[in-house]
Image (cartoon, helix red, strand yellow):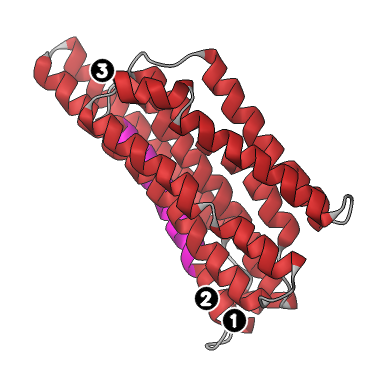
């Protein structure tokens, strides 16, 4: 057995053991109490949606970490960041589920804590996949990160009552518009158009449409739920939960597709 083959085998054993440890810790840390489990009613579709999404996020975390073994070195960071997104979201979803089951109120604070961590990571993914093909600059990283914070922080401050709700909404929309400009017409969009392979272009295009269409659910909910009071907490939470499934898990799967496709192509060429 060659040294390279031995190293590859040891690496797989190392990753497998750590994945088992991470999965075990997730299971132990996030197991619900019997009281909370008993409080979940069969007609509580919001609570059920929290359970389903939290399980999907946890499963996606294990999947993305496991798949780091299948891609070349320059794509591993992208998959690890995808796993971080779903892991952070899974933890928050278990807390949000408990808040809903216990109180029947929207877990607004937990949602914003989740978004403040996961949404910047999602934006950084655009930078990472462009970096993997040698088409990214530091400017892309910082513009996307700053745009994300401008979008999120005013929204939370408005919903928490620290600033006027209309002002918070307008500033947040400006941050979102800035992100869309960068990934469609800015440096990031031009780099993807001119330098990306077919697989990376497909993933990049789908990712930016998720940011456009999938993310539009949140400002619509903001207007209907918090500004106009026209949507019920039940409807808002179910829609937000389903949106997070697309905006986090499906987003990560697109990155996985690009990473595995490019890695397979590199191995074929070598």
Q: Earlier in the sequence, mark 1 or mark 3?
A: 3
Q: How far apart are the alpha carbons under marks 1 and 3?
A: 48 Å
Task: Note whether residue 66 is visible.
Answer: no
Badge 3 is on which residue?
Answer: 7
Q: Secondary structure at mark 2?
A: helix
Chief secondary structure of the magenta portion: helix
Q: How far apart are the alpha carbons under marks 3 and 2?
A: 44 Å
Measuring 60% from the left and 34% from the top, which residue is drawn there?
178
Measuring 32% from the left and 25% from the top, which residue is drawn there?
193
Which disc, if any, is residue 48?
A: 2
Q: Earlier in the sequence, mark 3 or mark 2?
A: 3
Q: Nearer the viewer, residue 140 or 4?
A: 140
Which disc, if any, is residue 196?
A: none
Residue 158 pos. (x, y %): 81, 53
Report the mark closest to the observer, 1 or 3.
1
Badge 1 is on which residue?
Answer: 40
Q: Secondary structure at mark 3?
A: helix
Residue 220 pos. (x, y %): 61, 61
Residue 153 pos. (x, y %): 75, 42
Measuring 43% from the left and 48% from the top, which residue is drawn there?
210
Please check the rendered image and state whether residue 66 is part of the magenta-colored stretch, yes or no. Answer: yes
Q: Nearer the viewer, residue 254 or 229?
A: 229
């Amino acid at each position: 057995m060659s040294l390279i083959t031995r190293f590859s085998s040891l690496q797989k054993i190392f990753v497998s053991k750590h994945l088992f440890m991470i999965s075990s810790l997730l299971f132990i840390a996030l197991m619900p109490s019997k009281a909370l489990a008993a409080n979940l009613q069969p007609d509580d579709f919001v609570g059920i949606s929290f359970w389903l999404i939290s399980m999907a996020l946890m499963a996606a975390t294990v999947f993305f970490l496991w798949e780091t073994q299948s891609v070349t070195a320059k794509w591993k960071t992208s998959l690890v960041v995808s796993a971080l997104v779903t892991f952070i979201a899974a933890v928050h979803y278990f807390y949000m589920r408990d808040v809903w089951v216990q109180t029947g109120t929207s877990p607004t604070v937990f949602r914003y804590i989740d978004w403040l961590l996961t949404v910047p990571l999602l934006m950084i993914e655009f930078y990472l996949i462009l970096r993997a093909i040698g088409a990214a600059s530091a400017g892309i990283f910082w513009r996307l990160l700053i745009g994300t914070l401008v979008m999120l922080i005013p929204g939370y401050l408005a919903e928490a009552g620290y600033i006027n709700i209309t002002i918070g909404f307008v500033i947040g929309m400006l941050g979102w518009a800035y992100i869309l400009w960068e990934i469609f017409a800015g440096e990031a969009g031009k780099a993807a158009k001119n330098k990306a392979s077919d697989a990376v272009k497909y993933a990049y295009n789908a990712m930016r449409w998720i940011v456009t269409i999938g993310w539009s659910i949140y400002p619509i909910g903001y207007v209907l739920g918090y500004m106009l009071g026209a949507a019920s907490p039940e409807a808002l939470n179910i829609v937000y939960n389903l949106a997070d499934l697309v905006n986090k898990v499906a987003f990560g799967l697109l990155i996985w597709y690009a990473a595995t496709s490019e890695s397979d192509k590199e191995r074929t060429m070598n």
